[in-house]
Amino acid sequence: MATERFVLPGSERAPHPGAQPAGAPDPSQFIEVSIVLRRKAPLELSAQAQPIDRAEFAARYGADPRDVDRVDAFAQQYDLHIVAVDLARRTVVVGGTVAAMNEAFGTSLALYHSEHGTFRGRTGPLYLPVDLQQAVVAVLGLDDRPQARVRCRRHRPIAPSAAAAASYTPPQVAALYQFPTNATGAGQTIAIVELGGGYKSADLTTYFAGLGVTKPSVTAVSVDGGKNAPTGDPNGADGEVLLDVEIAGSIAHGAKIAVYFAPNTDQGFLDAITTAIHDTTRRPTIVSISWGGPESTWTSQAMTSYDDAFQDAAALGVTVCCASGDSGSSDGVSDGRAHVDFPASSPHALACGGTRVAGAHGTLSSEVVWNDGVSGGATGGGVSDVFALPAFQHNAHVPVSVNSSHFKGRGVPDVAGDADPASGYQVRVDGHDVVYGGTSAVAPLWSALIALVNERRGSPVGYVTPTLYSLGAQACRDITSGTNGAYSAAAGWDACTGLGSPNGAALATLLGKPPTKAVDSH
């Protein structure tokens, strides 16, 4: 008798724009997918909650072992087998042949060619047996199309002297923003998620020695087969990796840096995030993410799973900083509509937008929205088409979307920082001294600041986004000049630079008191 099935909500995959069919994958090819399960109990967050210990969190809010048993029975029925189980991450990895996966999930996998190479894809929804209807949140990894792009841009001056005249070392940017100088991030671990490229230890040694900064501890962590694999091309993903590590590590050199390398797929990206958040060995207190893509390129099940992971982070006292995109209010989509970048649009992330700064003698003299008007580089920002307006933005005067839906959604970004390559960061990549910008730089900039604040206060600030909105002008420098396309800067929060760039000294003082309440569950 045929098994009764249901459509997994949010699993619908649209065709990849511009991709061409390239036949069928080998039906005997072995692949692995991540099945994301529901929490054992509902999670309710308070902005002032004390962090929960990771072991306690896993016991209270991890996956129910009975749901794992249900997945195991399903797998056996379709000649699949369980490869790994992580109750804290609520993830079951299931392996099997392409033919078995097609039958198990009611899909038809195919190969496609795109500008990024050949990938395995699918269209339409996934189908699962009804006894898994309440248990399964998402199935990721059947489709392995590239999911995200870097959010960094290399500065290419017309004259060789132009870069030196306008660029800054990360500590110089930190000084412009008055980051606290009596902290190094000691006792903190900054997790950095990377979906390609890598770093060479020799570059790090040379770079930090040149700055006169103690070289921080940097560790590569492999997720789903991803690894530290520098390409030797400073214009590729290596630029992203080194930009992230060198900004975070030179400003918070007392913190440990853990770089989680994973494949650039929706499965690999999520697995890297959840591995970092729930890492009981390195115990990160901040996660920096400089990769993303327009909301329209994601499945709903993926966005739900990532947002759930960020809620886990909030309960554990982990701050998640995400770059808001480098292509203005379109986010690089050419359909004439406005788009915001995900995962920055998750209401449980700190979305980081971009500015252009000018400084003299260590003092910030001017700051405007980053929009170079030539190459199309501009800070991402706007109104989410997916996530509703969160409570912490109710008084921020977030406009409705400029799209025809006029959706009253989550406003992006929350904060900003120097991102224009023309006022960019001096970094070292693959043996070259180069200048990079992009909102990719702002996520590790804010991550480093959070590490300094955490050390000073003696406990992590965790889910800091609602707190920043309550502090408002006290904590951030308001940016009132510039546009990212569909949206313009204005007094107060705006969809270009959010609340503004960091007032480091004020933030260190305002966030200096540890919380007193605990996370509640009902």
Image (cartoon, rainbow, N blue to C red):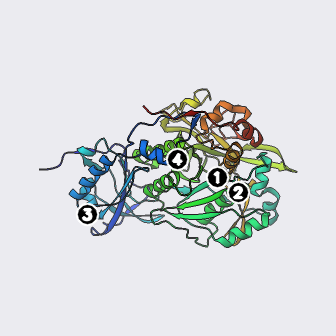
The location of residue 20, given as percent across then percent down, is 39, 62
Q: CA distance from mark 4 to mark 2?
A: 28 Å
- The amino acid at mark 1 is Gln
Q: Position of residue 183 (x, y in %)?
A: 75, 50
4 and 1 marks in contact (CB < 8 Å): no
Seen from the viewer's position, the closer of residues 426 and 192 is 192
* Circle 4/circle 2 CB separation < 8 Å: no
Task: Give the number of the disc on residue 289.
Answer: none
As shown in the figure, which amino acid type bears the numbered disc 4?
A: Pro
- Residue 162 appears at what percent x and percent y? 80, 61
User: Which residue is at a point 48% across and 60% down the rendered structure image?
Assistant: 264
Of 91 and 405, nearer the camera is 91
Residue 360 visible in rendering: yes
Name the residue that disc number 3 marks. Answer: 99
Q: Which residue is mark 1?
A: 188
With 363 as the anchor, is 242 left or right in this view?
Answer: left
Tag 1 and tag 2, C-beta contact below 8 Å: yes
- First along the sequence among labels 1 and 3: 3
Lower sequence index among marks 3 and 2: 3
Q: CA distance from mark 4 to mark 1?
A: 23 Å
Q: CA distance from mark 1 to mark 2?
A: 8 Å
Looking at the image, residue 397 lies above or below residue 309: above
Q: Earlier in the sequence, mark 4 or mark 2?
A: 2
Kindly identify the amino acid type of the residue bearing the numbered disc 2.
Answer: Gly
SS state under label 1: loop
Of badges 3 and 2, nearer the viewer stands 2
| Farthest residue, direction left | 1
Q: Which residue is mark 4?
A: 343
Residue in the picture at 46% in, 55% down: 271
Local crowd size for mark 2, using a 10 Å CA cut-off: few (<14), some (14–19), many (≥20): many
In this rendered view, identify the residue nearer to me: 424 or 447: 447
> Which residue is tagged 2?
254
